[in-house]
Image: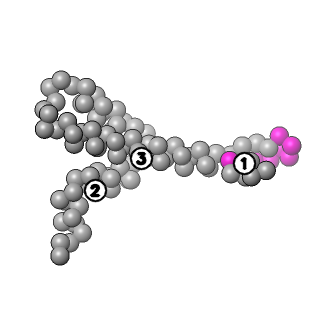
């Protein structure tokens, strides 16, 4: 049975996901921007097109995940009590 490290080495998407999970929003967005620029380059070999697209999709998913987490954690000022409450508390009221 292959070791986990061998499985990741044989699956580039798993490696890219692991790398993306370590990035903050700005880093993931920058990586995504670089990949999008590369995808727009007419000199990109077709053999690299699909893997670049898949990697860009992973970075996009990471950005969306981080934005969603941030949205859920945003504090809002309650106009009635002038105290802060989480986005979730405000929606429960």
Residue furthest to the right: 80
SS label for mark 2: helix
Residue 4 x/y as whole percent: 24, 69
The structure residue drawn at horizontal position 74% and vertical position 48%, both measured from the top left corner, is 90
Q: Residues under labels 2 and 3: Cα distance?
A: 13 Å
Is residue 86 in sight in this rendering?
no
Q: Which residue is mark 1?
A: 91
Q: Residue at x 34, y 42 (%)?
A: 57
Q: Which residue is mark 3?
A: 62
Mark with earlier residue (1, 3): 3
Magenta residues (range):
79-87
83 or 48, nearer to the observer: 48
Occupied quadrant, residue 48: top left
Q: Residues within 10 Å of mark 2 (few under 14, many from 20)?
A: some
Which sits earlier in the primary sequence, circle 2 or circle 1?
2
Q: Is residue 2 left or right of residue 79?
A: left
Discs 1/3, front:
1
Q: Is residue 22 left or right of residue 90?
A: left
In what element is the residue under mark 1? Answer: helix
Precedes in sequence: disc 2 or disc 3: 2
Q: Which residue is labeled 2 in the image? A: 14
Q: Is residue 73 visible?
A: yes
Badge 3 element? helix
Whole-percent x and y of residue 13? Answer: 26, 52
Q: Is residue 16 magenta?
A: no
Residue 74 rendering spot, x and y as whole percentages: 64, 45
Q: Which mark is residue 25?
A: none
The furthest residue to the top: 42
Other residues around mark 1 within 10 Å, as few (<14) / some (14–19) / many (≥20): few
Label 1, label 3: how far apart the Cα atoms are? 25 Å
């Amino acid at each position: 049975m292959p070791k986990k490290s061998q499985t990741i080495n044989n699956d580039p998407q798993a490696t890219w996901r692991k790398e993306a999970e370590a990035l903050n929003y700005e880093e993931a967005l920058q990586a995504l921007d670089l990949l999008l620029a590369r995808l727009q380059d007419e000199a990109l070999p077709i053999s690299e097109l699909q893997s670049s697209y898949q990697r860009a999709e992973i970075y996009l998913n990471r950005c969306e995940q981080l934005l969603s987490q941030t949205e859920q954690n945003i504090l809002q000022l309650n106009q009635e009590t002038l105290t802060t409450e989480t986005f979730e508390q405000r929606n429960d009221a």
